[in-house]
Image (cartoon, coloured by chain):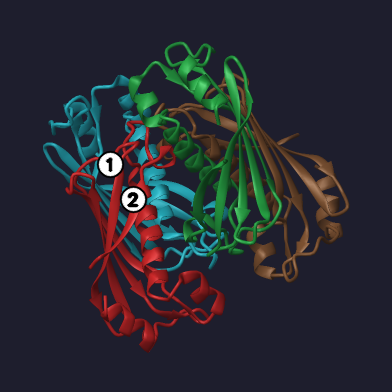
Chain colours: A cyan, B brown, C green, D red
Amino acid sequence: MAFEYPIYIGMSSVDRAGVLFYPELFRHAHDAYEAFMAGLGHDLAGLLDAGELALPIAHAEADYLQPLRHGDKARVRISVSRLGHTSFCISAEFVGLSGRTCARVATVHVCIHRAGADTCPLPDLLRERLADT
Amino acid sequence: MAFEYPIYIGMSSVDRAGVLFYPELFRHAHDAYEAFMAGLGHDLAGLLDAGELALPIAHAEADYLQPLRHGDKARVRISVSRLGHTSFCISAEFVGLSGRTCARVATVHVCIHRAGADTCPLPDLLRERLADT
Amino acid sequence: MAFEYPIYIGMSSVDRAGVLFYPELFRHAHDAYEAFMAGLGHDLAGLLDAGELALPIAHAEADYLQPLRHGDKARVRISVSRLGHTSFCISAEFVGLSGRTCARVATVHVCIHRAGADTCPLPDLLRERLADT
Amino acid sequence: MAFEYPIYIGMSSVDRAGVLFYPELFRHAHDAYEAFMAGLGHDLAGLLDAGELALPIAHAEADYLQPLRHGDKARVRISVSRLGHTSFCISAEFVGLSGRTCARVATVHVCIHRAGADTCPLPDLLRERLADT
C-alpha cells in the first residue's frame, strides 16, 4: 500500500493562468515527503532537532503531464524508488480525482553529517523502514 | 461552532531558526480562509472562474504571540469579525496543541467587479452565509 | 535620503488575477529590509551566524492601495518608524514608477537572546546606526 | 556573452539549516528567465496580457552541487540549450562569487494556445531572438 497525502491546489500555489506555478509542485512534494517520513517514525523536525544528520536534496526533477488548476484536489503517492548506502530516491506521483497522473516528482536525498557536510551511511533503522515501504 | 482548519508547520514554512517565516503565516491563513469559503458553498476557484467578481485584500495584519516551530501542529479558527455592505473582515486564530493562541491574522476583503476594479455590494447569498457563521 | 530597494513583480509573486498575492508583499518587504540592514553593516545572515541574538517579528501589517501587477517595477522605501530599547519598527513603502504609493508594510522587530528567547536591549551599535538613518 | 542575473540568498529562500530550500532554486531560476525574456523583448507579462499564447513548463530539473547559504550572492547564467519547433529548453547555471557552479536548473518550455491548450509553433520573432542568444 503506497503512502498517500491529499493536497488542495489553493490560490497560494497557482500562477496568473490559474495553473500550479511549477516550483510549487516541489513544495507540495516536500510536504508529502515530510508526512511520509513522519509516518515511518522519522519526522524531519526531530531528525534536525537532534542536530547530527541532515538529508539534503542533491537532485530534483518533475514532469508536468496535466495542468493542476486552482480548486483541484489530488493525492500525492510517495514511494522509495531507490535505496542506497548513503542516499535514497523518493518518487511523488500526483494523481487527480479522475485517477489520472497529473505530475511526477523525483528527488535524491543524501545523508550527511551536519558538521562538515560529509556524506555518511543512512542510519540502520531509517534504512530498514525505508526498505519496508 | 467556529470553523477550524488543521495545519502542520513543515520545512517549507520555517526560517533558519526553525520558526515560521512570518509571511508564511498569511499563506496558511489564506489556505484556511479558502477552505472556510468552500465550506460555505463559495469556493474562490469557482468565484474567480465565473469571472465577474473578486475579493482582493485591502489590509492584512498579524500578531506573533508564541513561536510556531518546525514539526508543530495547530488549528486555524476562522471567523467573520465584521460584515459590511461591500467588504468583510476575517479573523484567523492559530491555536497550538496545548490550546494556547500562537498567532492571529486579520484581513479585510473588498468586493470588486473584475472589469474596472470598482467596489460593489457583496452578493446577497454570500452575505447571508457569512452572517450565519 | 531614504533607503530604496528596487523590485520587479514576477510570475512567482502574482495570483491568478495577475496581481500580487498578498503574502508576497511581506516577502518583498523582508528582502528590502535585509538589504537595508546589510547597508547599515548589520547583515542578518552574519547576525544569525553569530548565534546570540535574533530579531523576530512580533507584528506585521500591510495596506494594499493600488494593485501591483505582473510586470510592474517598484521601489521599496525603507525607514525606521520607531526605535525603542528592545525593539524597533520598520516602514516599507512600495512606490510605483508613476511615483504613487501602491502599498505599505509596517513590522515590529524585537531583540531576543536566541537561547531562552528573552527580550534584550538592542546592541548599542545597531541602535546608533538605526538612529542615524 | 551569456545573460546573467544577480541574486541574493535572503531569509525568504533558506530552510532551517540556513541553506537554500530546494524549491526556491526554481523560483530564482524563473525570476532570471523572466529577466532574460524581457531582455529579448519578450516579457512574459506582455505575452500573457496579449492572451493568446502561453509557455508552460513540461519538465524541470535541478542539480544541487554546493550549498547556497543565507547571505550568499550568486549570478544566474541563462542560456537556450535547445530550440525546437514548438518548444525550447533553458539552462540556468548558478555561479557563486568564487566562480564555482553551485547549482544548475534545466526547464522545458512548450508553446501552447491558451484556449484549448494545444501545442503550437513558437512565434517566428521569438524563435529568431532565442536563436540569436
Which label lies toward us, 1 or 2? 1
**Other-residue count near label 1 (Cα within 10 Å), few / some / many at <14 / 14–19 / ≥20:** many
Q: Is residue C86 left or right of residue A128?
A: right
Earlier residue among tags 1 and 2: 2
Q: Are marks 1 and 2 in contact (CB under 8 Å)?
A: yes
Residue found at x 45% / y 71%: D43
Report helix, strand or loop for mark 2. Answer: helix
Residue found at x 62% / y 52%: C95
Q: Where is residue A121? Give x, y as percent.
A: 13, 31
How far separated are the C-alphas under marks 1 and 2? Answer: 9 Å
User: Mark 2 belongs to which subunit?
Assistant: D
Q: Nearer the viewer, residue C77 or B29?
A: C77
Q: Where is residue A106? Give x, y as percent.
A: 27, 53
Q: Nearer the viewer, residue A125 or D83?
A: D83
Question: Residue A121's mark?
Answer: none
Reading the image, the residue beneath label 1 is: D68
Reading the image, the residue beneath label 2 is: D25
Q: Is residue A101 visible?
A: no
Quarter that holds the C terminus of chain C? top right
Amino acid under label 2? Leu
Quadrant position of residue C63: top right
**Other-residue count near label 2 (Cα within 10 Å), few / some / many at <14 / 14–19 / ≥20:** many
Q: Is residue A51 left or right of residue C110?
A: left
Quarter that holds the N terminus of chain C? top right
User: Mark 1 belongs to which subunit?
Assistant: D
Q: Where is residue B10? Give x, y as percent.
A: 44, 36
Q: Nearer the viewer, residue D84 or C133?
A: C133
Report helix, strand or loop for mark 1. Answer: loop
Amino acid under label 1? Leu
Quadrant position of residue D66: top left
Determine whether C54 is above or below D40 in the image: above
